[in-house]
Amino acid sequence: MNIRLYVLQRATAAIMAPLVLAHIVIIFYATSRGLSAAEILGRTKGSIGWGLFYGLFVLAAATHGAIGLRAIASEWTPLRGHALDALMWGFGVALAALGLRAVSAVVL
Amino acid sequence: MADMIEVLLWRGKEDGRYQTFQVPQRENQTVLDVVSWVQRNADPTLSYRFACRVGVCGSCAMTVNGRPRWTCRTHTSRVVENGRLKIGPLANLPVIKDLAADLQPFFEKWQQAKGVFAPSKTRADPVETISPASAPRIAADAAIECINCAVCFAACDTVRWNEDYLGPAALNRAWTLVNDVRDAGNRERLAAVAADGGCHACHSHQSCQEHCPNKLNPTASIAGLKRRTMQAYIRGEL
Amino acid sequence: MSPRARQHTAGHRRNALWMAAMVHRLSGLALACFLPLHFLALGLAIDGEARLDGFLKWTANPLVKLAETGLVFLLAVHMLGGIRVLLIENMPWRDGQKNIAFAALALACVAAFAFLLRAV
């Protein structure tokens, strides 16, 4: 891992620490009242705040996960060089796209 | 205490095998004593490396019952398991023969990490005064007593899984020089340890610290390099 | 190095902090596998509230609740283990990392157990 990837991975980790904590609290809060689409969407639909929260969360998670996956693949698989970068970009872009699609589904 | 230790020694090169010897167990006997006993009494063709016998030179490290250790300061009473000792060459390095590993990759990485003092003054300059109480000197002193035994290198899975990784000893050495105010090579050194395979590959397993015979903490040194290189990166110096 | 020479050189892995790093890596890997499914499930809301509700009814299944407990554990243990790594890398050195790693594991277990108690 070079320093650019390191800084990006640690920065997204630091961003996500409070986001994950909030996410766990929300999970506890939501499941205690029984999960329903009305409840989730009632909270998120049209909310700029939740849109930013989940949008930032998705982008940080996609970046963090993609770099982490690259690090694991470089140590535990024979992939090297461009193949590693392709894996990182492929996973990261796909996860970000799926995630932003999900955010738009619950916010817009 | 059993009278005999069943000693399995690695014989041959990479594709070798373990050969069993019966070695009399004694009080105050080191693992190096056991290996020497075999070489003197059972098989004079056994190859292994040692020099000082007192934990200064760092040349006698081997794998002892699965873990890298300095054999001259490791008493058999501490490591024999069920009357057995399995001794092989250091891991993560090529095998020359029997118990002797080739340390060339280890020292090449030492060079790659710029683990060499770069003087900032000439012999015409007066000797610089360094206060032992200054923060950089305290940081350097904490990491300076490395004997290049390669035990940490053999204990590190990041070394095992990443052929480019410089390893704990080389990075620990780089950290002592980063903290040496007389050194003039830090721009190149920080670039070297921030490259692929540098300090950022470390996962803080702390196996190096766990196994270091001199109780050094290369993980802490590497964490220091991570901070220092990040500061340099943010300032645009890398 | 031949695999045969290697099999007898793994004693350093009998170490709590090596295990902590593995827990961190494997939990991260598991979360990376789960996230696409998580996003696809939430994406069902594009087709309307009813579609998402249909899926959420399925999650009331006790086996799914158990799997969700596992996910809460993975998320908590990865976050807490990650905070430990961030502190090692960015703060002055602190001894006692084994205790800190065990505390992170224990806290993640408590969080997962609390989730399970509330879910049933």
Image: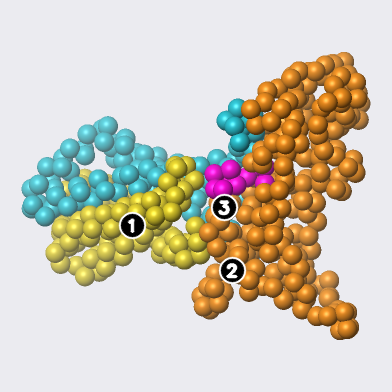
Chain colours: A yellow, B orange, C cyan
Point out the image quarter for the C terminus of chain A: bottom left
Say what amino acid the circle numbered 3 marks. Answer: Asp
Name the secondary structure under disc 2.
helix
Q: Give x and y (percent) for residue C8.
A: 64, 29
Write down the chain letter for disc 2.
Answer: B
For the stretch drawn in magenta, the main secondary structure is helix
Disc on the earlier residue, 2 or 3: 3
Q: Nearer the viewer, residue C74 or B57?
A: B57
**What span is colored magenta in the figure?**
B153-164
**Residue tagged 1:** A89
Q: Give x and y (percent) for residue B164.
A: 57, 52
Q: Nearer the viewer, residue B86 or C46?
A: B86
x 15%, y 58%: residue: A105
Q: Is residue A78 magenta?
A: no
**Residue tagged 2:** B191
Q: Give x and y (percent) for residue A102.
A: 20, 56
B19 relative to B97, above or below: above
Lateral position of residue B166 relative to residue A44, left or right: right
Picture mark count: 3
Q: Give x and y (percent) for residue B64.
A: 74, 32
x 85%, y 39%: residue: B50
Lateral position of residue C100 relative to residue B181, left or right: left
x 19%, y 51%: residue: C42
Task: Tell me if mark 2 has few (under 14), some (14-19) or many (20+) residues whose alpha carbon lies within 10 angstroms of its own.
Answer: some
Task: Tell me if mark 1 has few (under 14), some (14-19) or many (20+) residues whose alpha carbon lies within 10 angstroms of its own.
Answer: some
Write down the chain letter for disc 1.
Answer: A
C64 relative to B119, above or below: above
The extreme bottom residue here reads B125
Q: Is residue B158 magenta?
A: yes
Q: Which mark is residue B164?
A: 3
